[in-house]
Image (cartoon, coloured by chain):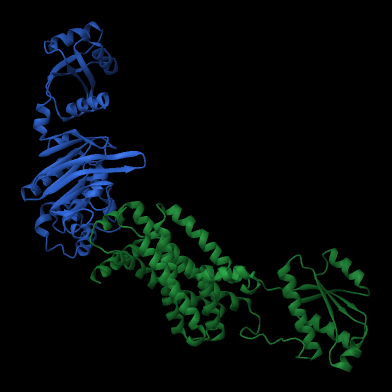
Chain colours: A green, B blue
Amino acid sequence: MRTVFFLVQKEFLQIFRNKTMLPMILVMPVFQTLLLSFAANYEVKNLALSVVDHDLSPSSRQLTAKFEASPYFQLQGQYFSVKAADEAMAREETDIILEIPANYERDFIREGQAQLSLTANAINANKAGVGLAYAGGIAASAMDAPSLTVDNLWYNPRLDYKVFMVPGILGEIVSLIICFLTALNIVRERELGTIEQINVTPVKKWQFILGKLLPFWSLSLVMMTVGLTAGKLVFSIPIEGDIWLIALYTIAFAPTMLGLGFLISNFAQTQQQAMFTAWFFILIFILMCGLFTPLESMPEWAQWLNMLNPVKYFVEFMRLVLLKGAGLAEIGSNMLAVILYGLVVNGLAVYTYKKRI
Amino acid sequence: MLSISNISKSYGAIKALDDISFEVASGEIFGLIGPDGAGKTSMFRILATLLLPDQGAAKIAGLDVVRDYKALRHRIGYMPGRFSLYQDLSVAENLEFFAAVFGTSIEANYQLIAPIYDQLKPFKDRRAGALSGGMKQKLALCCALIHKPDLLLLDEPGTGVDPVSRKEFWDMLRDLRDGGLTILVSTPYMDEAALCDRVALLQNGRIMAMDTPEKITAAFSRPIFAARSADMYRLIQDLRAMPGVADCYAFGEFAHAVLDDRSLKSSDLLQYLQECGHTEVQVKNAEANIEDCFIELMKKETTHG
């Protein structure tokens, strides 16, 4: 243990002396959280709406007025035939067509519900999907029929995009940085030849690896704290769950990404090789972690494959705990998976790290 | 102290070490002399327990480099050819770190490194990366010595160091040897070879000769003349064409001519060169040194092998 202490001490000396390392650890989580949360915005506003009202009843006019009042829709035009509305969509003048059938008011009064038709321009699939969901919500509230559509948006009642994104982005950034730092740090020692000088000492494999992991392990907690503070101050993201649970999970999760960085470094001779290998994995991890696309919409085989995506677990955890206030019982299986993952990856890293060739 | 028997190591089709055997006694400076690519570094890496030999065995103080590598790492001090300390740590921090990972402290073995470390002391807070070549070398030596090894492995310590620092460095090595340390050193510089107690001349992974530097040069039987003129390139060509001259090659600012014909005198060479139209001609007797021996042995190897 004494040896590990000296290895960690050496590592911290180097980290604090490195001019780019500290800014990267402190500024990157804040900067990326702020930038990505503002820029990578899926919120859809001011959709151009066309209404084809065949009913022309007080109820149908009330419905149209409800749409007009919503910030998501801008009434572009009223048409008397679907054909005319379709033409407007073809000219890109309208995004969504609301068709109100002739017996809307009658059905509504007699049966308490009525049929409506919504057509969306799905060239931008995301915009169309979000638009249809908004429209469905408004229509349901107009009919006052909670059985028809659920418009209770739980855990993020105002559909605030940032509330949804910030916890995920934080999870993603911390995962990414610690993986890169570990991989590059070890390969740097290989490039400079210092690893060879360590290899001829009696330092054991596990001591060397622990000496590398511990500093970045603790840095992951620092980054998490900085990022959460920034998220709270700037976006007032909710922190429903226990803050100590977040710390505990970060401690349980970090070895997975650290071990992955270590594993990559074992197969790279130069920092460039390590960088590209790490990017290959990280890019897949990020795109498939559920941050930008819902996991459920992926094909089944991809969802199975995604079980191997560590970032997925972290993003899932962050949302569950920050937004939903989940406790240890709810995230237990997630945490167990992550700990197991960490053990396997680090086991492989220790096994493939060779002091001798 | 060190006993190497029939070590071979190949990298693919390239034979870096080909059936090498030699012994080094306690308290001697043994030099592995050879050009780049001769296999010196491979030999050192095997002895430093960093590389596994394909064949053969090596024992240091009775410990096998493959089987007993863990125990051995406490007994050897290895200084690689490339400066491999932490450039972003200071002189003192590097030394403290290596002492710590060997489970010792600077104070415990200070006596051993004192003569060297005293020269580094004024710079002890300077980053290792900002030191001069000579100072880096001294720091690396300190770090290799800090755990009081029995055998010091120095792979090309003279490379990239100025002549004054090199001389100082060799003086330190001799002091360490007098203190009882065994030193295995490699160098491509023939002048450093003469400073070793015994040397092995290495070429293409094979030992061409092994003895004390004096005996190796004494075995060189043919007379040598050093010659120079205004046009060195043509001088070498002309001397090679001269009857009775076995070989001629550049040697510093002179050309060394090795003679087959013992009856030739320096005046004969002078006359021949002047007849060839050379100006500013100078010819003098020269003593064979390790480099002459090396070149002769190398030529024999290539013609016979």
Horizontal relation, residue B209 to residue A4: left or right: left
Above or below, B146 relative to A65: above
**Residue B284, how many percent across, how many down?**
13, 17
Nearer to us in this view, B57 or A51: B57
State whether residue A119 is above or below residue B140.
below
Residue extending farthest top: B275
Q: How many marks?
A: 0
Res. A71 visible in picture: no
Could you tell whether B111 is left or right of A138 in the image? left
Is residue A321 visible to us here?
Answer: yes
Q: In screen coordinates, is A37 left or right of B89?
A: right
Residue A118, relative to residue B107: is it above or below? below
Q: What percent of the width, then of the height, locates residue A110?
A: 89, 94
Q: Position of residue A98 (x, y in %)?
A: 84, 77
**Residue at (88% x, 85% y) in the render:** A60
> Which quadrant would the C terminus of chain B be assigned to in this image?
top left
Res A296 → quadrant: bottom right
Query: Residue shown at 18%/65% (left/top)?
Result: B103
Give the camera-side residue of B11 and B144: B11
In the rendered image, the vertical position of residue B152 relative to residue A253, given as above or below: above
Residue A352 on image: x %, y %: 37, 60
